[in-house]
Image (tube, helix red, strand yellow):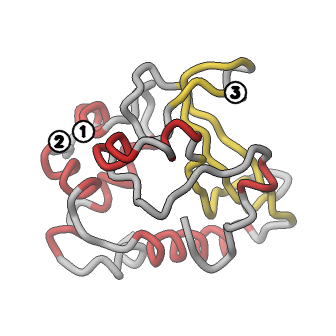
Amino acid sequence: MADVFASVPRRDQRDKDDCYLRGPMLDGRRKSVQAMAGRLADGNEQNLQQFVNQSPWDPLPVRRRIAERLVSLISPSAWVIDDVSVPKDGRMSAGVAPQYCGALGKRAHCQVAVSVHAVTYAASCPLQWRLFLPREWADDAERRERSKVPAEAGHGRSGCSRRTSSMNSTGGA
């Protein structure tokens, strides 16, 4: 996996990349840094927190490399654009609001993201994703700053296909 994070500038940052990739894939309901660090044998919460929140590195080359590896591995027969919802207990994670949550089949506090997947009959690999920002988040500068939501991120129109209109195959998250 070293090639996936080759674009990350500092060696000490790259030393934590494996934990960052493994953490979200482990069993467990909560995917916070604290919960992931607790489930990883080599998980250091402070190091993982810094890697995720304060360490300056561009995620686009990393995502691009993951997509290249996955596409060559599964040879996709189709591309799927989907919205993915993640139920949330709290309200502090970026984009969490009462909205339709497909995972629960009802309106609930959740995050919603739009994703592009390469698919075959036997496999599906997420290649690109973007957090959907509800209007209440887009209109609250203090909340956005506290959660480090970039100023240029705005509220998308409803509907999965419209939410992906600014997504492209070469870039933006």
Q: Secondary structure at mark 2?
A: helix
Q: Secondary structure at mark 3?
A: strand
> Sequence-wise, which precedes: disc 3 or disc 1?
1
Which residue is found at the position 64% from the left and 27% from the top?
99
Which residue is tagged 1?
Answer: 37
Q: Is residue 167 left or right of residue 80?
A: left
Spatial CA distance of label 2 from label 3 is: 32 Å
Residue 98 figure quarter? top right
Identify residue type, mark 3.
Answer: Tyr
Q: Position of residue 150 (x, y in %)?
A: 40, 59
Q: Is residue 46 left or right of residue 127?
A: left
Which residue is found at the position 23% from the left and 32% from the top?
38
> Sequence-wise, which precedes: disc 1 or disc 2?
1
Which tag is nearer the camera, tag 3 or tag 1?
Answer: 3
| Residue 45: image tag | 2
> Sequence-wise, which precedes: disc 2 or disc 3?
2
Which tag is nearer the camera, tag 2 or tag 3?
Answer: 3
Which residue is found at the position 61% from the left and 62% from the top?
128
* Image height of 100 relative to 37, above or below: above
Identify residue type, mark 2.
Answer: Glu
Q: How many marks?
A: 3
Which residue is tagged 3?
Answer: 100
Spatial CA distance of label 1 from label 2 is: 5 Å
* Image height of 76 relative to 113, above or below: below
Identify residue type, mark 1.
Answer: Ala
Q: Position of residue 149 (x, y in %)?
A: 40, 53
**30 or 156: nearer the viewer:** 156
Q: Secondary structure at mark 1?
A: helix
Q: Residues within 10 Å of mark 3 (few under 14, many from 20)?
A: some
Q: Position of residue 57 (x, y in %)?
A: 30, 72
Q: Is residue 24 left or right of residue 147?
A: right
- Quarter of the figure with the C terminus: bottom right
